[in-house]
Amino acid sequence: MAFMKTAAPELLSLREAIESIDTDILKLCHKRQQTAAKIARVKQNLNLPTRDLNREEAYLKMLKQQAQPELSAKVIQDLMILLMSASVDLQDLKRSQTLEEQATHVKCDK
């Protein structure tokens, strides 16, 4: 128990650091999703598909080269696949919302 009492302040400080980092990560994820929504509009205007598998593969390969002992290539890949999937889902949602809005406008114009 004595060890826990002496280690507790350091542990609490490190946990606070992690919580701050996690908050920053979530803010960046939000910013990434906002950018993905903009990308959806651009792709729709250019009549491009939501996904570009060649780009995704090349991007993952590039990111995995940044692996470090504390952050393996597998963790990077898993994390980025999760983030890219969230972006694709959002882009698909934005696309369908835009199509629904366009269909509503067509009905109202008739």
Image (spheres, rainbow, N blue to C red):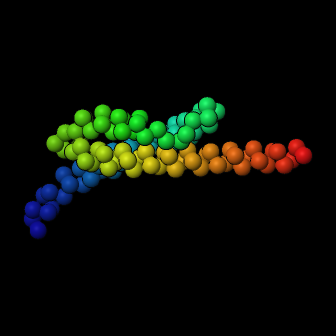
> Which residue is at 43% across, 45% downward?
84
Image position, residue 48 (x, y; %): 57, 35
The image quadrant that residue 40 belongs to is top right
Image position, residue 68 (x, y; %): 19, 39
> Which residue is at 25% across, 48% downward?
74
Q: Is residue 59 left or right of residue 46?
A: left
The single residue placed furthest to the left in the displayed view is 2
Image position, residue 73 (x, y; %): 24, 43
Image position, residue 30 (x, y; %): 48, 44
Q: Is residue 89 above or below residue 42?
A: below
Q: Does residue 28 show up? A: no
Quadrant of the image for the N terminus?
bottom left
Q: Is residue 95 above or below residue 42?
A: below
Q: Is residue 63 left or right of residue 53?
A: left
Please state which of residues 98 and 9 is positioned toward the viewer in this rendering.
98
The single residue placed furthest to the bottom in the displayed view is 1
Q: Does residue 25 show up? A: yes
Figure disc tally: 0
> Which residue is at 72% across, 49% downward?
100
Please state which of residues 15 and 4 is positioned toward the viewer in this rendering.
15
Please state which of residues 7 and 105 is positioned toward the viewer in this rendering.
105
The single residue placed furthest to the right in the displayed view is 110
> Which residue is at 61% across, 31% downward?
46
